[in-house]
Image (spheres, rainbow, N blue to C red):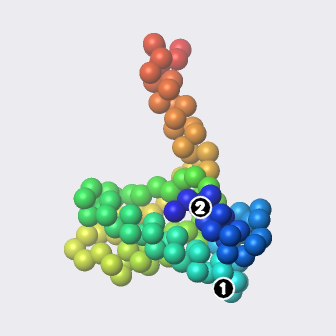
Amino acid sequence: ASALSITNAYAQASGKTGTSSEEIATLSQNGDAIAQKIWENAMASIATACQMLITVLAPEVIIFGGGLSQSGNLLIDPIAKSLGESLTFQKVPQLVIAHYGAQAGTIGCAMLALDLLPNGGN
């Protein structure tokens, strides 16, 4: 699930365009039935992906960036709850929002590109 997939699903189901994933998360918390269904499905998908990651790699921390990171605890809390209920012998890692939020991926790509330049871009 991505911010774009959530906004597209909400637009298709509600007929309302231009609603951000953060707004959809808030609408979900405020009782909007369409937003609740879409947000819950998205969080379940992300939790399932995290569960597979945890089972294979056992990370100590999972960092969320991108557009969904703007939702803060509305993103973290349902995923943590799902992981706590579904993991058996694995430890639930720390779930955090990337410091640079929605820009984390872009900044990371730029840093990787700089590393590929001779002398690290200096």
Q: Is residue 72 above or below residue 81?
A: above
Q: Which residue is mark 1?
A: 33
Task: Name the residue nearer the viewer: 44 or 34.
Answer: 34
Q: Residue 99, which numbered label?
A: none
Q: Is residue 73 above or below residue 32?
A: above
Q: Residues within 10 Å of mark 1 (few under 14, many from 20)?
A: few
Where residue 24 sits, quadrant-wise, is bottom right
Amino acid beneath label 2 = Ser
Asked if labels 2 and 1 touch by Cβ distance under 8 angstroms, the answer is no
For marks 1 and 2, give the CA distance. 18 Å
Task: Name the residue nearer the viewer: 39 or 83.
Answer: 39
Q: Which residue is mark 2?
A: 5
Percent x, y for residue 74?
A: 59, 72
Q: Residue at x 45, y 69 (%)?
A: 45
Q: Could you say whether the residue bearing mark 2 is in a helix, strand or loop?
A: helix
Task: Name the residue nearer the viewer: 93 or 19.
Answer: 19
Q: Is residue 44 above or below residue 62?
A: below
Residue 71 shows in the view: no
Q: Residues within 10 Å of mark 2 (few under 14, many from 20)?
A: few
Percent x, y for residue 51?
A: 34, 67
Sequence-first tag of 1 and 2? 2
Q: Residue at x 46, y 74 (%)?
A: 44
Q: Residue at x 51, y 24 (%)?
A: 114
Q: How many marks?
A: 2
Q: Could you say whether the residue bearing mark 1 is in a helix, strand or loop?
A: helix
Task: Name the residue nearer the viewer: 36 or 54.
Answer: 36
Percent x, y for residue 85?
A: 36, 81
Amino acid beneath label 1 = Ala
Q: Is residue 120 left or right of residue 7?
A: left
Residue 61 shows in the view: yes
Where residue 68 sits, quadrant-wise, is bottom right
User: Which residue, as the protein is rendered here, is positioned at the far left?
Assistant: 89
